Amino acid sequence: MYQQEKIKPYGLKGDKGKLVSQMFDNIAPNYDRLNHLMSFDIDKGWRRKAVAQLAPYSPKSILDVATGTGDFAILLAQSLKPESVIGVDISTRMMSIGKEKADKAGLADVITFQKGDCMQLPFEAGSFDAVTSAFGIRNFQDLDMGLSEMCRILKKGGHLSVVELSSPKSFPMKQLFKVYSHVVLPTYGKIISHDKSAYEYLTKTIEAFPQGEQMVEILKKAGFSKASFKRLTYGICTMYFAEK
């Protein structure tokens, strides 16, 4: 078991998947506003870089895992012009916001949303050309199982593109990020979302989550090949790319 799998929202005992679903349902109304505010909108650039990794392969069918409010799914649809993008998440409230955004963007015929658990994705093996996830895999109840499922539903030769928050390793960004994540982020969370505990949980999972070379080995163990990573913005975010 990886360290972040032991961390549960609100410090409660019980099934992590259910607790994560409850947490995101709670913060859904303010999630987008807070997310962009706290990242100074840099998160949008991170997503664009992840999409660019897939562009040379022109995927026609894409599954966006832990899609949340659909920002990544919408960007994928607008940038890559696939035939279909399916967003999967365990939070109904997050996806309802995503659906509204996709409809407003005129993408209702391309993007659909479906409730599902990454531990057991409701799709046949080899169903998609690409699978993506932005800032979601560190919340998996079982990282190995979730990644294995993402590999299973990919076609042979299909690609994985993931962006995830990470902890900077070098001075002074390491020290600055620690202050920001432990003081500023939970405070913003309390003021805007009225749920300080949720953002304390998210900070703890960032610090505990395996990254870099370790994550590449985990991807290979899950069935992916040619796995690689690239640190972005001084290590605040890490981008992963792999092939089945």
Image: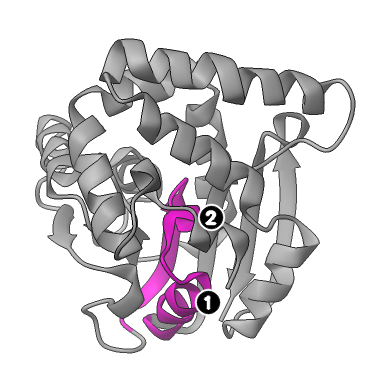
Spot occupied by residue 68 in the image (x, y as percentages of width and height): 28, 45
Residue pictured at 58% horizontal, 85% vertical = 223
Q: Nearer the viewer, mark 1 or mark 2?
A: 1
Q: Is residue 37 visible from the viewing direction of this image?
A: no
Identify the residue shown where x is 24% and y is 52%.
21
Q: Secondary structure at mark 1?
A: helix
Q: To which quarter of the image does residue 150 belong?
A: bottom left
Q: Could you tell me residue 230's position as x and y percent?
A: 74, 49
Residue drawn at point x = 55 percent, y = 48 percent: 163
- In which quadrant is the N terminus drawn? bottom right
Residue bearing mark 1: 144
Query: Which residues make up the magenta segment?
Result: 127-153
Q: Quadrant of residue 242?
A: bottom right
Give the left or right position of residue 237, taking residue 67 as reference: right
Q: Residues within 10 Å of mark 2 (few under 14, many from 20)?
A: many
Q: Is residue 24 above or below residue 225?
A: above
**Residue beneath disc 2:** 162
Horizontal and vertical percent position of residue 69: 25, 39
Which element carries disc 2, helix, strand or loop? strand
Please tell me whether residue 67 is drawn above or below residue 32 in the rendered image.
Answer: below
